[in-house]
Amino acid sequence: MSSAAPTAPDAAPDQAVLAADRLPRRLSPARLLTTVSRHRAGVTVGLLFVALAGWLTHGLWPDPATRVLALNPADQALYEWFLAADARALLGDFDLLTDRLNAPDGVNLMTNTTVIALGILLAPVTLLLGAPITFALLALANLAGTAVAWYLLFTRTLGAHRVAAALGAALCGFGPGMVSQTNSHLHMTAQWLVPVIVWLVVRLLRAADPAGGETADGPDRRRMVSSAVGLAAAVTAQVFIGEEVLFLCAITLLVMAVTYAATDRGLARRALPGFAGGMMLATGLALLVLAWPLWFQFAGPQGVADGMFSPHYFSADLRSWWTVSPLSVLGSDEAARLTTGPAEYNTFLGWPLLLVTAACAVWLGRRPLAVACVVGALAMGALSLGPRVVLDGERTAVPGPYALLSGLPVVDGALPMRFALATLPLIATLLVLAADRALRGAGRARRLVPAAVGVALLPLLPAPLPTAERPPVPEFVTAGHWRQCVEPGGVLVPVPLATPQEPWPMRWATAADAAFGMPEGFFIGPYGRDGTAAMGTYKLPTSALLTEVARRGGQPVIGDQQRRQAAKDADFWGASCVALAVDTPHADSLRGTLEQLYGPSTRIADAWIWRV
């Protein structure tokens, strides 16, 4: 890219990425009115995004404590527990190794996607109103916040027309992958820091380019340092929100940076020394804060160094790319067979969007930013296909690019199909560049291109997320009666115990703000002698017995051996109390079994308890 100011209207966006207007301007009345009008337009766009996010998640309201996302209720129970555990930081009762789950070993919160920063930030909401309300707010805010952040990046950094920016930001915040991940994956939808990270990288590049600095003497070192410090802070915050999003962002930016440098070698020669130094400074500052938490995640107690999800299973089906998401208004439920579940419609972009994006890319030509976006989108899309290409549900013999990365540290913890999430902002940027060029020009393109972009996005208009009623938490918990049999911080054993498949008892602890611990549960931790990553942990004999009764009913034969084992297991858990809600399925069979194991029960509110 030439450092000279472009003369053609369609070159303006690329130049805006690399050259900020640093000259002071007089605040004339006309400029003041323009500024006010521009902010009014931005606020309007932001409110529209909030309204759309509210419409998509309205099924959780007006009382989120009685509603649940119907397509992924288990993960919602998990994240609500995470939010309750995180909120205890406000009470001075928080540790990266929490003892409130999987007693007595605990759970490594860094190993799990515990959205620590969000949980602590919204701790007052959780403690005052409950984790379900915090969850519902975040489900809404992540969608709207991501869209707003990209809109600001497109308008203020890229210098794009507001209409073009709004279309692109809508795809970034409400694309198929974002909507599907809203089915309880808060760590994947909290992407509003990604545009901030991109902006800081661009700001650093601007400052490192001698031709783009404030003076002719060389790079703007002060701006380089402030950009590096800001980048370190944003990266650090994102680690405690969602590491997988940060990983995808880093891979995408690396591919784009290499492509941009190859396309604009003059810029690379000028800016590389300063840019590399700034990135090293940002990395060093971030590691000062993150070194210990990352060590704790991979090598600390209950930490794991490997991934537990098979890249072969979580590979995107090639056909899904030109299929419309089942969660879109025009989508079909039949397409659901092309992915692993309703939270992973990451690649369902539909053929209209793919065709329009390809046309926009061709029209934009060899502009460095457009080329970088095309290469980045192709690379991340190819990686989403996994080790072997899957077509229409059939695994082929064709190897996918992901096979080159499979087994590498950190990489094996990412799901291949989620690489497709990085294509949303890349495709959006191409659409923004094309629509902006058309809107700033003349002729038929001025109307044709934005209209084509709008038509391509129309099939992806999302439908409201399905919700359902959730069973109420026993009054034994909600009214605080649990304190009669276990001290705060102690261990209560709900029957049956929580499992990754049925984590519902974790809602008891969530309703009590994680004030007591419980054995086993739904989490990621080490399993077996080699400590490989696994979901949940092994069941002790008493837990396995009670789980079987809860599934089938009946009265198992209980002898002295089972009673001794029950006492041993309760002692291992450090349990003070065993509790059974009266409306639990097969409650009579469970109560009879527990009375044979632990003796007569005591009724408190709507639960039977055994003090052990």
Image (cartoon, rainbow, N blue to C red):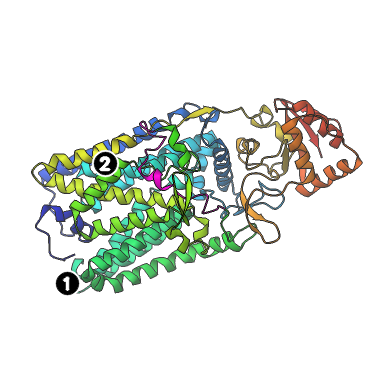
> In the displayed structure, would residue 277 be above or below residue 394?
below
Residue 564, percent from left and from top: 88, 44
**Residues rendered magenta in the picture:** 309-331
Report the amino acid beneath label 2.
Leu
- The residue labelled by disc 2 is 167
> In the displayed structure, would residue 501 be above or below residue 106?
above
Q: Is residue 408 magenta?
A: no
Residue 453, percent from left and from top: 24, 41
Residue furthest out toward the right: 560
Q: Is residue 532 left or right of residue 122?
A: right
Residue 347 appears anywhere in the view: no
> In the displayed structure, would residue 304 be above or below residue 567?
below
- Residue located 31% across and 56% down the image: 199
Report the amino acid beneath label 1.
Ala
Categorize mark 1 by other alpha carbons within 10 Å: few (<14), some (14-19), many (20+): few
Q: Which type of secondary structure does the marked residue at label 2 adopt? A: helix
Q: Is residue 319 magenta?
A: yes
Label 2 or label 1, whichever lies nearer to me, is 2
| Disc nearer the start of the sequence (2/1) | 2
Categorize mark 2 by other alpha carbons within 10 Å: few (<14), some (14-19), many (20+): many
- What quarter of the picture does the C terminus occupy? top right
In the rendered image, which quarter is residue 163 located in? top left
Q: Which type of secondary structure does the marked residue at label 1 adopt? A: loop
- The residue labelled by disc 1 is 216
> In the displayed structure, would residue 482 be above or below residue 346?
above
Q: Is residue 264 left or right of residue 346?
A: left
Q: Mark 2–mark 1 contact, CB under 8 Å?
A: no
Residue 171, percent from left and from top: 32, 42
Residue 533, percent from left and from top: 61, 55
Residue 140 appears anywhere in the view: yes
* Whole-number angstrom distance, CA of label 2 to CA of label 1: 38 Å
